[in-house]
Image (cartoon, grey):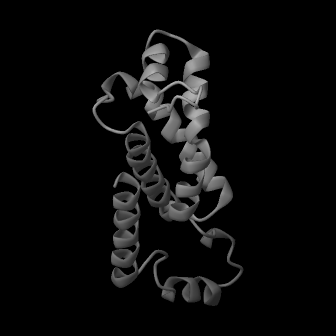
Amino acid sequence: MASPSDSRPDDSVLISSALRGDQEALNDLFSRYYRFLYFLASRVVGGREDAQDAVQNCLLRAVRNLRQFNNDGAFRSWLARILVNEAIDLLRKRRRRPRFSVGHASSEDERDALDRLPAPGLNPEQALAKKESILALAKEVAG
């Protein structure tokens, strides 16, 4: 909520204006939270480019679903939940990408060595720790 000394409009005012088609209100609303979202994304996905992608995907989803936002809650928390979901999706997609091409191995021994490597990704303990840290971060952001 805006204080008397703060001339910035409240989120709910910007949301209402954006829903009526005011692009400037939408830009103001998202620029208000961009740094927060980028920081959160970088904590979840790690890399700069992946964080930017997660934020962009988050904002696109928020635009598409803005009418579904329940104005009783905090817009910042709503955006954070979308961002965490987008970041997790991005991590899942990244894990599915091939890390190297087996087709370029120059000998049978190299192919055999590649076959013996463990599958990329997290072991169960690492996956649980990552999930717990993401949930704790999301809870901290929402609370």
Q: Position of residue 93 (x, y in %)?
A: 48, 56
Which residue is most to the front? 4
Q: The C terminus lies in which quarter of the figure?
A: bottom left
| Frontmost residue, 113 versus 133 | 133
Which residue is most to the top? 20
For residue 72, which quarter of the picture? top left
Point 55% across, 12% down: residue: 22
Q: Position of residue 45 (x, y in %)?
A: 54, 62
Q: How many marks?
A: 0
- Residue 58 drawn above or below residue 93: above
| Frontmost residue, 89 versus 13 | 13
100 on left or right of 19: right
Point 52% across, 56% down: residue: 40
- Residue 17 drawn above or below residue 120: above
Point 69% across, 71% down: residue: 104
For residue 130, which quarter of the picture? bottom left
Point 33% across, 60% down: residue: 139
Q: The N terminus lies in which quarter of the figure?
A: top left
Q: Position of residue 116 (x, y in %)?
A: 49, 88
For residue 71, which quarter of the picture? top left
| Frontmost residue, 60 versus 26 | 26
- Residue 59 drawn above or below residue 123: above
| Frontmost residue, 62 versus 17 | 17
Which residue is most to the right? 106
